[in-house]
Amino acid sequence: MKKFANFYAMKDVIGNILQTELKKEGMPTIKDFASMLGISSRSLYNVFNGSSDLTIGQLFKASDILKIDIIQRLAGFNLSGNVVSDPQENFHAKKKMLSVNIKITGSVDSFKDFHQLLEIFIEQAATFGFRLT
């Protein structure tokens, strides 16, 4: 995994989680897993080595296929590369924050009410302990 200053590139962490889970007994082959995600085996290998990303939809689909909560695992990933037993302990540490970018698309007309969506999102995120910046 590539380490930058005090954090790992999140895409490297995701690739590591997927590789670890796919090695377990009863999991699909890499070729089958890639097909289930709608990507090529080559693209999946690029996810493993950190040179490509999965969409949020693909992450949720991967969670379903592997029967794990990838998002929870990401929240529990500490800076030394280990999964912590209490994700909240790591997540709330001041210098150990997880950052996620979300791309929102829609018609030009739908963005006239974007501020309302953003207000709802900020309010709901706060109930889960997240902060939008």
Image (cartoon, helix red, strand yellow):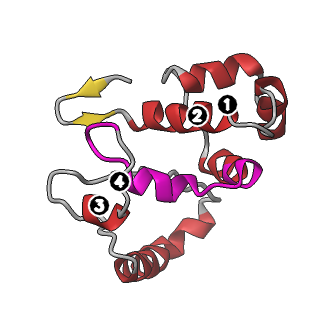
Q: Nearer the viewer, residue 58 or 23?
A: 23
Answer whether labels 4 and 1 touch (C-beta < 8 Å): no
Percent x, y for residue 42?
70, 16
Sequence-earlier tag: 3 or 1 = 1
Sequence-earlier tag: 2 or 4 = 2
Residue that carries the numbered disc 2 in the rendered image: 20
Left or right: 79 as drawn, with respect to 27: left
Residue that carries the numbered disc 1 in the rendered image: 23
Answer whether labels 3 and 2 touch (C-beta < 8 Å): no
Mark 3 vs mark 1, foreground winner is 1
How packed mark 3 is, by other alpha carbons closer than 10 Å (few <14, some 14-19, many 20 or more), is many
Answer whether labels 2 and 4 touch (C-beta < 8 Å): no
Amino acid carrying mark 2 in the image: Thr
Left or right: 107 as drawn, with respect to 116: right
- The residue under the point 49% across, 76% down is 117
Left or right: 45 as drawn, with respect to 33: left
User: Is the C terminus in the top left, top right, bottom left or bottom right quadrant?
Assistant: bottom left
Amino acid carrying mark 1 in the image: Lys
Residue that carries the numbered disc 4 in the rendered image: 84
Magenta segment, which residues? 63-81
Q: What element carries label 3?
A: helix
Amino acid carrying mark 4 in the image: Val
